[in-house]
Image: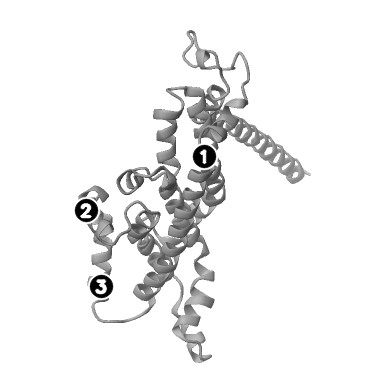
Amino acid sequence: MIRNKEGLRMFQKLKIKYQNTNKKTFWCQVLLIIVMCVISFFMLMPFLWCFSTSLRLPKDSFALPPSFFPTEWRWENYSYVFNAFPFWRFFRNSIVVTVTISIFQIFFSTLAAFAFAKLQFKGKNIMFLYILSGLMLPYQSYVIAQFFIINYMGFYNTLIALILPFLSNPFGIFLLKQHISSIPDSYMEAATIDGCSKWRIYWNIILPMSTSSIAVVVFMKFLEQWNNFFSALIYINSEEWFTLPMGMKTLQGFRSAGNLAHILAGVMISLIIPTIVYAWGQKYLLKSIALSGLKS
């Protein structure tokens, strides 16, 4: 009887302690959610303000005191961007350049990473260090020499001038090598015993097991090239081949005469594709960091 009473008291104490712990955990979660909501609000505020300003009258863009909501919602600001501005052409040029670079970078980067991670050949380490040296050189340090080469080859003022210099990707090779090195050699040994060639091992084993790192390379380089203003400024002088960053500069300087609402309408449209790519690629970015060993 005494033992039953002691057991009951102990059970009640544990129950009270468990309830208190649950309450603390609950309020900690509530506090965390509130903090994250506040941080998210401040992070989204610039985008919301840009969207609001893109729908204003020209006279309201710099009105004091500023108002978050437009006095008149002018959706025609967006139609103006397409009607008075060859936006679709710039959009198409950006898509062609960005997609082409992403495809070729993935192809060359995965091949090189596979060779450096799994194959043995003379000078492998020296060659890998030479490729990594490309990460240490700023683009501006060799852009003049690159310009003369592009001009000599006859590619100046063409989309090829925006594509050719970026077909190699030292960072992509490094990241993919880290991931492919973590794939056990037993997969390759089993495939070799079954009669698979190096190319088939690369295509049927390495690529499917490297999708997370490949997605990260696509994600990062797509966004980088989509926003690449410097290269278009150097290699393109015809409006026919302008990409979106150069097109937005044209909109700002010549088409709208400083109309901030029209400029931000173009900015909001140009953000659609990067937003979709970011929403798709962020989960692969975290997964790849965990798998590639970059945390250490």
> Can residue 290 be seen here?
no
* Residue under the image location 52 percent in, 46 percent down: 278
Mark closer to the chain start, 1 or 2: 1
* Residue under the image location 52 percent in, 64 percent down: 211
**Pair 1/2: label in front:** 1
Where 38 sits versus 119, above or below? Answer: above
Name the quarter where the N terminus is drawn. top right
In three-dimensional space, the C-alpha distance between marks 1 and 2, rounded to whole angstroms, equals: 31 Å
Disc 2: which residue:
142
Q: Nearer the viewer, residue 95 or 189?
A: 95
* Residue under the image location 44 percent in, 35 percent down: 248
Identify residue type, mark 3: Asn
Q: Which label is found at residue 149?
A: none
Disc 1: which residue:
87
Disc 3: which residue:
125
**Pair 3/2: label in front:** 2
- x then y, percent, for residue 96: 48, 54
* Residue under the image location 47 percent in, 23 percent down: 260
Identify residue type, mark 1: Phe
In three-dimensional space, the C-alpha distance between marks 3 and 1, rounded to whole angstroms, equals: 46 Å
Mark closer to the chain start, 3 or 2: 3
Where 98 sits versus 125, above or below? Answer: above
Kindly state the secondary structure of the residue where label 3 is placed.
helix
Q: Dot 1, how many residues are within 10 Å of its Cα: few (below 14), some (14-19), or many (20+)? A: many
Q: Is residue 240 left or right of residue 133?
A: right
Where 120 sits versus 266, above or below? Answer: below
Identify residue type, mark 2: Tyr
Q: Nearer the viewer, residue 85 or 180?
A: 85
In three-dimensional space, the C-alpha distance between marks 3 and 2, rounded to whole angstroms, equals: 24 Å
Q: Badges 3 and 2: C-beta atoms under 8 Å apart?
A: no
